[in-house]
Image (tube, helix red, strand yellow):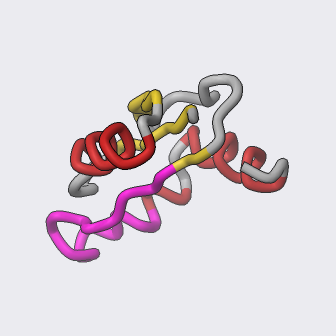
Amino acid sequence: MKAAVIIYPGSNCDRDCKVALERSVDAQVSMVWHKETSLPEGLDLIVLPGGFSYGDYLRCGAMAALSPVTRAVVDAAKAGV
C-alpha cells in the first residue's frame, strides 16, 4: 500500500499518522508538504491530519483549503483515492 500524509502548518500528529500506517498496514508513506502541487503516483490512501495545535484560532482549516496541494488531493479523491 502507498500512502501520503499531508503536512499543513499548525497541524498535529502528522508523524504519528505516518508511523501508524507503517506499523498497522505496512504502508510506504510519503510526507507531502502543503506547498507541493502534486502527489506521489499510485497512492492508495491520503491522510489529512487534524488536531490543529492552536485550535482553529489561526484559521488553519481555512488556510489548508487554500494550500496548493489541496487541488491534487481533491483530484485524487474524485479519482477514487
Q: Residue at x 30, y 49 (%)?
A: 20
- The quadrant of the rendering that contains the N terminus is top right
Residue 4 point in image, percent of width and height: 49, 38
Observer able to see residue 1 = yes
Q: Is residue 72 above or below residue 54?
A: above
Span of residues in magenta: 47-62
Left or right: residue 59 versus residue 79 is left
The residue lying toward the viewer, choosing from 52 and 14, is 14
Left or right: residue 64 versus residue 59 is right
Tag count: 0
- Residue reaching furthest left? 54
Image quadrant in which you'd find residue 2: top right
The residue lying toward the viewer, choosing from 15 and 9, is 15
Question: Does the magenta portion include 31?
Answer: no
The residue lying toward the viewer, choosing from 27 and 72, is 27
Observer able to see residue 8 = no
Q: Residue at x 55, y 53 (%)?
A: 66
